[in-house]
Amino acid sequence: MGTFEIVRTWDADPDRTFDVLGDLPAYGQFQPLTRIRATPGPIAPGWSFVAYTGLGPASVVDRMVVTAWAPGEHFEIVKIGPVLDGWARVHLTPEGEGTRIVWREEIVPRPGWLGRRVGPVSDPLMRWFTGRSLDRMGERVSAR
């Protein structure tokens, strides 16, 4: 699979936008068939969480660690397997009365040779899945 980028502009300031985007334990509310198990404590570099997407034993396990955390500005996570490898980088920039969000992500199924083979099919699906989740988060920001 490859790297993709999604850009959105929301009618909210960067702090309010980050309140929703940075609520990593709540991501299961925005992503279909996903539940999150998070490490206790405040989010900061080194904090980790696991997303389980699917039904029961057929779920994909996506372990992640926060590597950068600047509320109102950006955050980064790294995927550490066992099924998925990659990263996500999210940057927020004030734009007029709102915030421009740039979400860049690379998702690579393990082993790498399999990821390269399924990429042409899975990349558009992951771009759609992530974009849909961002749109649902944007609705939450607008409702505040």
Image: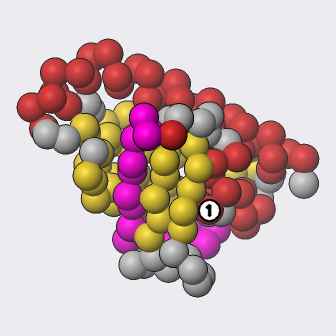
Magenta span covers which residues?
Answer: 57-73
Which quadrant holds the N terminus?
Answer: top left
- Judged by its main secondary structure, the magenta piece is strand
Q: What residue lies at 49% left-to-right and 52% top-to-bottom?
A: 51
Q: Residue at x 72, y 64 (%)?
A: 19
Query: Foreground: 40 or 126?
Result: 40
Picture coordinates of residue 17, whole percent (x, y): 72, 57
Please identify the residue farthest to the left as the structure is shown.
113
Name of the residue lying farthest toward the bottom? 41
Say above or below: 43 vs 72.
below
Q: Position of residue 37 (x, y in %)?
A: 54, 62
Please name the amino acid that badge 1 sits on: Pro
Left or right side of 103 for 138: right
Q: Is residue 95 found inside the magenta-colored segment of the image?
A: no
**Numbered circles on residues, count:** 1
Q: Outermost residue toward the front?
A: 57
Please provide percent x and percent y for residue 15.
Answer: 72, 66
Q: Is residue 90 visible?
A: yes
Residue depicted at 44% across the width and 22% down the height = 125
Q: Quadrant of residue 89?
A: bottom left
